[in-house]
Image (spheres, rainbow, N blue to C red):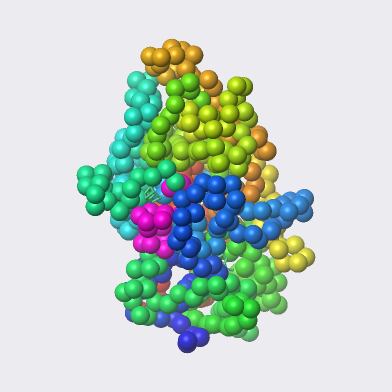
Amino acid sequence: MATHSDVIIIGSGAGGGTLFHALAPTGKRILLLERGDYVPREKQNWSTKAVNLEGRYNTTEVWRDGQGGALHPHTNYYVGGNTKFYGAALFRLRHQDFGEVKHHGGVSPAWPIAYEDMEPYYGRAEALYHVHGERGVDPTDPPASAPYPHPAVSHEPRIQHLADDMARLGLKPFHVPLGIMLDERDPRKSRCIRCETCDGHPCLVSAKSDAQVVCVDPALERYPNATLLTGARVARLETGPSGREVRRVIVERGGATEAYSADVVVVSAGAINSAALLLRSASDRHPRGLANGSDVVGRHYMGHVNSVLLALSRCPNPTVFQKTLALNDFYWGTPEWDYPMGHISFVGKVDADTLRAGAPAMAPGWTLDLMARHSLDFWLTSEDLPDPDNRVTLDRDGRIKLEYTPNNEEGHRRLIAKLKQLMKQQTTCGVHGHECHEGLFARSLYAGQRIPLAGVAHQNGTIRFGRDPKDSALDVNCKAHEVDNLYVVDGSFFPSSGAVNPALTIMANALRVADHLAARLG
Ligand SMILES: Cc1cc2nc3c(=O)[nH]c(=O)nc-3n(C[C@H](O)[C@H](O)[C@H](O)COP(=O)(O)OP(=O)(O)OC[C@H]3O[C@@H](n4cnc5c(N)ncnc54)[C@H](O)[C@@H]3O)c2cc1C
Ligand code: SF4
């Protein structure tokens, strides 16, 4: 195959896969380099034991934590990247998230672009990823120029009951915007069968809107100018003598080392791997790492303050697809506490195998299996702030080292307290009365209630974009300030992360950068 292309994209996830799809119709030669292969289609795709307990699809790569200990990251290297495994909750950042926001723990910095700049691309990303939702119910919903392309996914009875209870208390629960190809009006023809193994699992029937299914494969089918190389791990980027242009993309593939080149090179390997790649590409012209004159590459790692909390009731929770309800009433705080707290939603319904993988604090008198059958499984997200000391570096052997000290936790604690309060105010159960609700339990014992460092699902922020080359690595088009043909479009460009899931913003931004690149390439 030709080793020179118009554009090389490194990584096929939310950022890279979306960009590949958007650039393919330009007719330019686009080469997508992906270190992983396709997720094998097999029954284990939908096995919680294989996926959650045995980590069948996790990378076996070992990183280092801040103390130099072994870190086994919960991340996946496949065509489609982490979107193969995501819960497909596709949120826009809130309008104010683009501005500076004061938190209890410090300041969340403004983005160099406004919500209005991103709005049309959010709309396009929602259409591309088949988002099902309802606008205007969530009080923090940002303005949108069009309705969601598909109706919201309905609640099952236990979740509807909870939504009604919340509404009775004057809150505004809403339907999670979801990228799944579910047609509830015509279940026989619906591609999605509404199963319990969506969040965290690949979709065996290709009905989840992941980057492989909706972007990479359709682009490959339609456009001969678009090419994918799997098993192609990019080891290093090399510039020409001026240092202003990436000339060679060095790839390890099938045990050999190969070199590729392109007029434009786009890195989209995920926020941690992209930072590591730029750091590994240090040279005489870029001694601190490629495009890192500002010394921000690898810094300001964010991953959200996340908790999984199980609310146990004596009554069972027979819900199959649980991730339909969310609550943002406390996103910006409360009248008594004027700082942001965050977002309340759900994970996919847990079972005993999933619980075993993160041994929960056992409720007295309950087995794991019983807990799983009776729990409502909440997912709480709050914003962590970009701290320069929370960072990706390389150890002496070139391995990834991830240092992270949690910050801005008070808002999260208060969010948990709010949820506890809410759960106590549910309508009295007809069978068990007030005794039905037994309390909230953290899913994970090993890090208290919080998701541990290895939980890098929401990684972002390590190669931030901005207007000032002194404190950002990328300009507003996500082009490296110091390199004329180098771009980054994964989650690393975030200067701050809000408290909703990141993928839709990564996808929308990739579409924005695609417009810029299409104009540049002519
Ligand atoms: C279990 C789980 C559930 C989630 N649920 C949600 C959700 O409901 N909503 C949401 O918004 N987000 C969710 N996320 C997060 C979401 O998946 C990520 O934010 C998103 O996929 C990040 O996109 P990205 O382009 O930055 O990186 P990725 O999607 O991770 O893509 C990076 C790609 O680069 C490849 N790569 C890495 N290094 C190299 C290299 N050196 N050479 C070549 N290729 C390389 C990787 O194999 C991968 O394919 C979830 C994540 C997980 C793991
Ligand atoms: S069938 Fe639907 S609910 Fe099940 S994994 Fe696929 S997209 Fe998710």
Residue occupying image coordinates x 53% and y 29%: 371
208 up-or-down from 408: above or below: below
Q: Quadrant of residue 322?
A: top left
Front position in the image: 198 or 15? 198
Where does residue 496 sit, x and y in percent of width and height? 53, 49
Examine the residues drawn in magenta and state their main secondary structure: loop
Residue occupying image coordinates x 48% and y 21%: 314
450 up-or-down from 115: above or below: above
The extreme top residue here reads 433
Where does residue 130 sit, x and y in percent of width and height? 31, 53
For the question of whether residue 149 can be seen, the reply is: no
Residue occupying image coordinates x 56% and y 44%: 304
Q: Is residue 324 left or right of residue 68?
A: left
Residue 205 located within the stretch drawn in magenta: yes
The extreme bottom residue here reads 2
21 up-or-down from 105: above or below: below
Q: Is residue 326 left or right of residue 128?
A: right
Q: In which quadrant of the rendered image does the C terminus lie?
A: bottom left
Where does residue 203 sit, x and y in percent of width and height? 42, 54
Residue occupying image coordinates x 63% and y 30%: 361
Q: Is residue 467 left or right of residue 181?
A: right
Where does residue 160 sit, x and y in percent of width and height? 34, 29
Q: Is residue 279 left or right of residue 481?
A: right
Front position in the image: 255 or 99? 255
The extreme front residue here reads 43
**Magenta extent:** 198-214
Residue 331 located within the stretch drawn in magenta: no
For the question of whether residue 447 can be seen, the reply is: yes
Q: Quadrant of residue 508?
A: bottom left
Q: How many marks?
A: 0
